[in-house]
Image: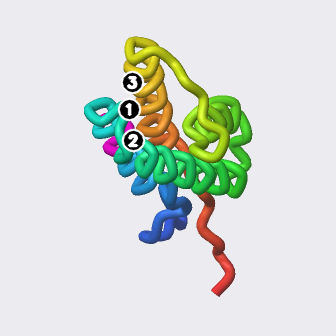
Amino acid sequence: MSQQKSTSRYPTFTRTALAPGLLAAICLLAAVAVIGSGWFTILQFAITILALIVCVFAWQAQQWWWLIGLVPVAVVWNPVWPLSFDPPVWYALHLAAAIIFVAAGLFIKVPVSTKK
């Protein structure tokens, strides 16, 4: 008699942070082209909101270490109390934040509830 592992064909986790992470990375790369214009402020709102959304998913997944990268993103791109940097600094920050968002989207896994 062989013992078989009972596995479900349904996933045990979801990558809920993937879509907002990729969208935020796209917004960050688009914002590089419009630094200093009114569009930059609009993109700052989007980036800050998406950072906070990914923070919620990181919290749900109990992967709090992602907050170390995501909370500063929400603070730096906050349009209510804007920080001003020279364009080369903004370019580097945008690239670093885009990498953080893509990595967070790929690695944050929220467990699926087995209760039905």
Residue 116: give x, y in percent of width and height.
Answer: 64, 87
In this picture, which residue range is highlighted in magenta? 25-29
Residue 13 visible in the snapshot: yes
What residue is shown with label 1?
36
What residue is disc 2 on? 40
**SS type, badge 1:** loop
Mark 2 and mark 1 in contact? Answer it, CB < 8 Å. yes
Q: Which mark is in front, 2 or 1?
A: 1
Front residue of this view, candidates 107 and 5: 107
Of discs 1 and 3, which sits in the foreground?
Answer: 1
Q: Which amino acid type corresponds to the residue marked 2 in the rendered image?
A: Phe
Determine the residue positioned at 26% across, 32% down: 33
Structural distance between the alpha carbons of marks 2 and 1: 6 Å
Q: Which residue is mark 3?
A: 95
**Residue 70 place in picture, x, y as percent:** 61, 37
27 left or right of 62 in image: left
